[in-house]
Image: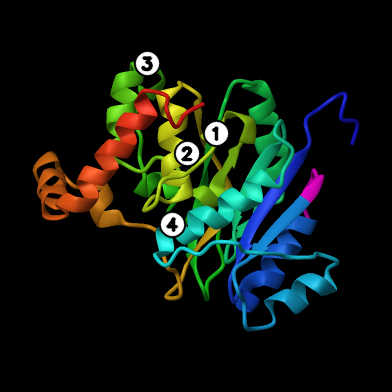
Amino acid sequence: MNSAQRDPVVGVLVTHNSQQFLVELLDSIDSQTRPLDQLIVIDDNSTDSTRSILSERGITAIASTSAATDPWTRIASNFLQGVRCAPPESIVILGDHDDTWLPNRVEHQSHVMASFPQAAMLASDGYTTNSTNSTNSTNPTLRSTFPVPAHWSELTTRAQFTYAVKHSIATGGASAVRPSRLPATIPTGWLHDRWWSLAAVSKKAMVLDSVPVINYRISPSQQVGLDTQAQHQGTKDWVRHHVGNAGRSIKRSADLAFLLTGRLNK
């Protein structure tokens, strides 16, 4: 790669007892039409053959430094650790350990990000699958679960942010980010993709993309994943849910207030 011509494109994966699907994922990364310039893997205390599989592929995993006990904060901390290992001006492509990448993912997402140099985050689409079936273009997509208004680009920043607070608009495993344009920290209790998408929207730096770039695997072992019920809540149900979780909601409201005032968004 000629760094004078383009920014480096770096992949960041987080693994934890990932042996079941890891070879398939790594094969899909090796088969990209545009190879990554670097692959960073953060391993969170795997006790199976995950590290051996990585080592056989010439990949040295970096041990997770997270001490968090709740899954949201721990996963976010691991991805933040990986992103911090990448050059600040790189384009970082995020990957979940049980998905596979479509062959043109790196080429497509690096091209889109290069076309929007001020973008902090790119949220692409993906096909959903399970642990036994193959994925094809007839499968439901992530965007069918996480829809956005057709006139999204015409909305004001306030309207986009209000929508993004109530509805997930990005799936981390199908996203790409620029480390230099992300908040330096992620508050406890937030997933990385949720926080980064809100930060990007608040700065008018979110790019939404309808092109599928991954096969998103839905499996019983997932700690976090698709939440279709919450995604399609009406306003009354959304309010009722957050009133019922008042402590967490108050904390999140405070986090969002900091985000909007720029105190976490430098």
In the picture, the disc for residue 154 is: 3
Mark nearer the N terminus (3 vs 1): 3
* Residue 196: assigned label: 2
Residue situated in front as seen by the camera: 25 or 71? 71
Q: Earlier in the sequence, mark 4 or mark 2?
A: 4
Are circles 1 and 2 on residues that touch, CB within 8 Å? yes
Which is in the foreground here, disc 3 or disc 1?
1
Crowding near the residue tagged with mark 3, few <14, some 14–19, many ≥20 C-alpha atoms within 10 Å: few
Q: Position of residue 155 (x, y in %)?
A: 34, 18
Residue numbers of the magenta segment = 31-38
Q: CA distance from mark 4 to mark 3?
A: 33 Å
Tell me which amino acid carries mark 4. Thr
Label 1: few (<14), some or many (≥20) within 10 Å?
many
Q: Position of residue 145 (x, y in %)?
A: 35, 49
Residue 126 relative to residue 190: left or right: right
Q: Which element carries disc 1, helix, strand or loop?
A: loop
Q: CA distance from mark 1 to mark 2?
A: 7 Å
At label 2, counting other C-alpha atoms closer than 10 Å, the crowd grade (few under 14, some 14-19, many 20 or more) is: many
- Residue lying furthest bottom in this view? 48
Q: Is residue 266 left or right of residue 257?
A: right
Q: CA distance from mark 3 to mark 1?
A: 23 Å
Mark 4 = which residue?
73
Residue type at numbered disc 3: Glu
Report the disc number at residue 182.
1
Query: SS of the residue at dot 4?
Result: helix
Q: Nearer the viewer, mark 4 or mark 2?
A: 4
Q: Nearer the viewer, residue 134 or 206?
A: 206
Residue 229 is at least partly visible in this image:
yes
Q: Tell me, what colour scheme is on the image? A: rainbow
Checking the image for residue 191, the label placed there is: none
- If you read the primary sequence from the N terminus, does the residue marked by circle 3 or circle 2 appear first? 3
